[in-house]
């Protein structure tokens, strides 16, 4: 887990829409000013950084072809705030290159040129599938309840891909659709709209569970003529499980992974299109949190972060992530491979004979404030394993009268220690401060002119619009599956298009959105996606078409 932690700390600070300035404890203190201000200066990042996590054992041989788990959905804040980025429990999947020490990242890539401590292999920052539930500084339409994004990088963090049309990067570049050659996610579902700002949920979620599975499936052929370098047949496919939608949503084009090996032999055969995947752990990543700080009359420094909300049950427990499973090819890959070449049917349900539950252990809370270590959390809360024995599930146990994450911290030697609000001198003025609210951002746009992958071959029906619970309006069109923008840079032949179109039509025709593809959670209720995201194809387009988003903008001022 440690390599991924360090990678995320550097990368996501870069992506957060600004520059995270790392300063010493003395520099933090120097900016405080008078101990009795009416309005303190709000520091827009660095108030809390670290992880709430569990360690997950790597898969045994043969079980690196899928990962699934459930994560809780809830409003982490009473109202959305500016400069706030925390990922709810999720994971990272990287290609299994354990014990491989050659440099996987070519010169000229971000990781190779800037992250020398990852040498010699760079395997932990080579390729990842990540994303998940959370709150991001790049969000344009704020929501108190978390959203869900797909996200990953195939080229050592040169850029990231978030949806079938957009990337994940610092504004404003991520608001403009990706160039055709950079697109890597392909939409399968003909029932679920995929907005670039993330999937929204029904308001009122309070710890309900959202299921996520990434499964390596043979949806595109390894021997196809369009490959520009040797490429495997693994299309890592996202399945989700919610109260009102279950099933596959999108997959990664295998060539997106293999492209980095063209002209660079050390990466050949080491990419996610051909290698098993390794789950790097389960964690909440606390990245960008604003804070206020001030000294009392004795020169002691105090700090305050926003109030973080958690769903707590009657036993003073918060379930964060549960029911982690890992899969062999026998779980789904094998049946899809056989289905592609015959008239037999496949249900799409994961065969649990090809599943295992890894061993998992909770990690202690570990946080810092501008690299200054933070302690004292164990007086309020600690991580624990939850659920049935061996279920690989973890959460938080709240102590004493506490049911909330500590907001206040006091200077303690070279660190900061969590303290109750009652121990903070009123003269610091911290209790009276209000954090800056998030504001609505700019639209996500795609090219509107002719001769682009959005217009040629182009959609068959639309435009249509929906309004989401975050107050945004999403515009989408119905494209024939093989005509969607993210496939056009492959320049598929008519035969290749027909084969791929046929496979997806069989999935759409035979896999309904109310089937339990991944096992239901061992306990707890399923979360509910925003009902506006679930659409019905127009008449005559019931099979073989997908709703592709072309724009997302504010529809109204939303009271969060």
Image: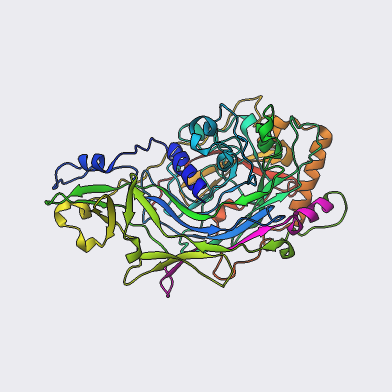
Q: Magenta region: which residues?
A: 312-339
The image shows a total of numbered marks equal to 0
On the picture, is 506 further left or further right than 263?
Answer: right
| Residue at (34, 37) in percent of width and height | 21
Q: What is the x, y in percent for residue 401?
A: 31, 71
Q: Is residue 332 magenta?
A: yes
Q: Is residue 18 magenta?
A: no
| Residue at (68, 40) in percent of width and height | 270
Check the image and name the residue furthest to the bottom. 314
On the picture, is 72 further left or further right than 18?
Answer: right
| Residue at (28, 57) in percent of width and height | 417
Q: What is the x, y in percent for residue 257?
A: 66, 38
Give 74 or 127, whichever is nearer the viewer.
127
On the picture, is 327 further left or further right than 446?
Answer: right
Q: What is the x, y in percent for residue 3?
A: 51, 46
Q: What colouring method underlies this structural image?
A: rainbow
For the question of whether residue 377 can be seen, the reply is: yes
On the picture, is 426 further left or further right than 51?
Answer: left
| Residue 403 in which image quadrant | bottom left
For the question of whether residue 321 can be seen, the reply is: no
Q: What is the x, y in percent for residue 505?
A: 77, 48
Give 398 or 79, whichever is nearer the viewer.
398
Check the image and name the residue furthest to the left. 297
Check the image and name the residue furthest to the right. 342
Please determine whether, in this image, residue 1 is positioned above or below residue 259. Answer: below
């Amino acid at each position: 887990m440690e390599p991924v932690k360090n990678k995320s700390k550097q990368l996501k600070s870069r992506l957060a829409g600004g520059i995270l300035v790392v300063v010493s404890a003395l520099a933090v203190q120097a900016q405080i000013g008078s101990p009795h201000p009416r309005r303190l200066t709000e520091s827009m990042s660095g108030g809390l950084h670290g992880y709430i996590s569990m360690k997950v054992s790597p898969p045994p041989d043969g079980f690196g072809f899928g990962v699934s788990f459930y994560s809780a959905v809830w409003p982490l804040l009473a109202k959305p705030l500016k400069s706030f980025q925390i990922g709810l429990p999720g994971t990272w999947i990287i290609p299994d290159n354990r014990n491989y020490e050659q440099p996987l990242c070519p010169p000229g890539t971000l990781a190779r040129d800037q992250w020398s401590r990852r040498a010699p292999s760079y395997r932990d920052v080579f390729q990842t599938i990540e994303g998940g539930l959370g709150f991001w500084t790049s969000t344009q339409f704020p929501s108190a309840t978390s959203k869900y994004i797909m996200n990953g990088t195939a080229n050592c963090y040169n850029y990231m891909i978030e949806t079938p049309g957009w990337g994940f990067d610092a504004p404003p570049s991520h608001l403009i659709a990706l160039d055709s050659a950079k697109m890597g996610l392909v939409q399968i579902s003909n029932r679920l709209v995929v907005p670039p700002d993330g999937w929204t949920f029904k308001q009122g979620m309070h710890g309900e569970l959202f299921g996520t599975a990434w499964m390596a499936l043979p949806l595109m052929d390894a021997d196809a003529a369009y490959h520009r370098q040797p490429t495997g047949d693994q299309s890592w496919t996202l399945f989700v499980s919610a109260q009102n939608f279950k099933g596959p949503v999108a997959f990664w084009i295998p060539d997106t992974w293999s492209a980095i090996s063209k002209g660079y032999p050390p990466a050949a055969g080491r990419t996610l299109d051909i290698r098993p995947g390794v789950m790097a752990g389960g964690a909440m990543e606390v990245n960008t949190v604003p804070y206020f700080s001030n000294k009392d009359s004795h020169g002691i420094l105090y700090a305050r972060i926003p109030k973080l909300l958690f769903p707590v049950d009657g036993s003073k427990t918060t379930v964060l992530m549960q029911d982690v499973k890992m899969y062999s090819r026998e779980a789904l890959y094998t049946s899809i491979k056989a289905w592609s070449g015959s008239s037999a049917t496949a249900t799409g349900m994961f065969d649990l004979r090809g599943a295992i539950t890894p061993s998992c252990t909770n990690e202690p809370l570990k946080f810092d404030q501008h690299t200054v270590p933070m302690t004292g959390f164990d007086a309020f809360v600690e991580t624990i394993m939850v659920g049935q024995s061996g279920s690989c599930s973890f959460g938080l146990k709240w102590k004493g009268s506490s049911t909330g994450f500590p907001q206040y911290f006091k200077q303690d030697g070279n660190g900061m220690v969590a303290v109750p609000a009652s121990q903070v001198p009123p003269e610091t003025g911290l209790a009276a401060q209000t954090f800056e609210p998030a504001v609505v951002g700019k639209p996500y746009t795609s090219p509107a002119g002719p001769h682009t992958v959005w217009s040629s071959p182009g959609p068959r029906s639309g435009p249509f619009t929906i309004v989401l619970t975050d107050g945004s309006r999403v515009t989408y069109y119905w494209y024939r599956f093989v005509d969607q923008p993210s496939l056009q840079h492959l320049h598929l032949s008519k035969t290749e298009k027909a084969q791929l179109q046929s496979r997806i039509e069989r999935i759409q025709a035979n896999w309904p959105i109310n089937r339990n593809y991944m096992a239901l959670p061992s306990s707890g209720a399923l979360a509910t996606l925003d009902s506006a995201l679930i659409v019905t194809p127009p008449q005559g387009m019931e099979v073989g078409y997908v709703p592709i988003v072309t724009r997302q903008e504010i529809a109204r001022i939303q009271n969060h």
